Image: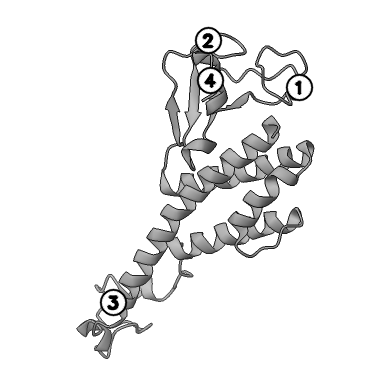
Amino acid sequence: MTPHHLHARAALESLRLARQHLAVLARREAARNAWAEQLPAAPILHAPTYGTRHATGGHADPVSGRLAVEEPPARLVTWATRWEIADSRLNGIARMFGIPATHTLARIRHAIPTLLPATAAVLAQHLVDEDVLVRGWLDLPAYHEPLVGVACPHCGERQLVVQTAGPADAWTVICATGRPCTGTGCPCGMPGAVEGAPHIWPRALVLGAVAGVTR
């Protein structure tokens, strides 16, 4: 696969893990709400004066004036609504690329290797945006680990980072310097190098180059 395909797959795996965390929170929230609905209402809710718009006290009553003008309730954003938003957005991305919006993550993963490089690049950016959105909701850091002591095949600096989302044999390596590929003849050594693409390598390729063998 080209660098664009690798970026798309890495973003998809990161999004998959983030969505798993989101799904857990949504399920826990639903369970708490179901339990709360079984509790009897608080006594004040049955009081005859609860919720009245009219003054219930004298001129010194500090509440009656505020009850005269009611503000619209704030929209309640729950983990369930966030899940619905994330799911709707992902399904929209799938439809944009002609991918059926059922079992969406699996179908996108299956489709990535079949895409043209330019199409994979666009898909990768959409998936990155979704991953950043969901991880932002959850305050999750990126699934990254430094590759200590290994020089970048392109620039020689020791700022490589392993993207650890997904199965280990699919992990990829990027350079934290962010220097783009120069295309054909680039010292990065990446098969299918694409000019301007952020550098990315299969982890096995980098480790194999360091050891002098293919792992």
Would you call the spot at circle 3 few (<14 residues within 10 Å), some (14-19), or many (20 or more)? few
Q: Residue at x 47, y 48 (%)?
A: 17
Q: CA distance from mark 2 to mark 4?
A: 18 Å
Spatial CA span between label 3 and label 2: 55 Å
- Marks 3,2: beta carbons within 8 A: no
Q: Tell me if I can see residue 176 in this picture.
A: no
- Asked if disc 3 and disc 1 are in contact, CB closer than 8 Å, the reply is no
Query: Mark 4: which amino acid?
Result: Gly
- The alpha-carbon separation of the residues under discs 1 and 2 comes to 20 Å
Q: Which is more foreground, mark 2 or mark 4?
A: 4
Q: Residues within 10 Å of mark 1 (few under 14, many from 20)?
A: some
- Specify the amino acid type for callout 1: Glu
Which residue is denoted by mark 3 in the rendering? 35
Mark 1 lies on a secondary structure that is: loop
Which of the 4 image quadrants contains residue 139?
Answer: top left
Question: Going by the picture, which residue comes out furthest to the top?
Answer: 156
- Residue at disc 4, secondary structure: helix
* Residue type pointed to by label 2: Glu
Labels 2 & 4 near each other (Cβ < 8 A): no
Residue 68 position, x and y percent, is: 41, 76
Q: CA distance from mark 3 to mark 4?
A: 54 Å
**Label 3 vs 1, first from the N-terminus:** 3
Asked whether the beta carbons under mark 1 and mark 4 sit within 8 Å of each other, the answer is no
Query: Is 25 left, or right, of 6 in this rendering?
Result: left
Instruction: Name the residue tied to disc 2.
Output: 157
Q: Residue 120, relative to residue 89: is it above or below?
A: above
Which disc is residue 195 wearing? 1
Residue at label 4?
A: 208
- In the image, what residue occupies the spot 57% across and 38% down? 10
Residue at the left extreme, as displayed: 43
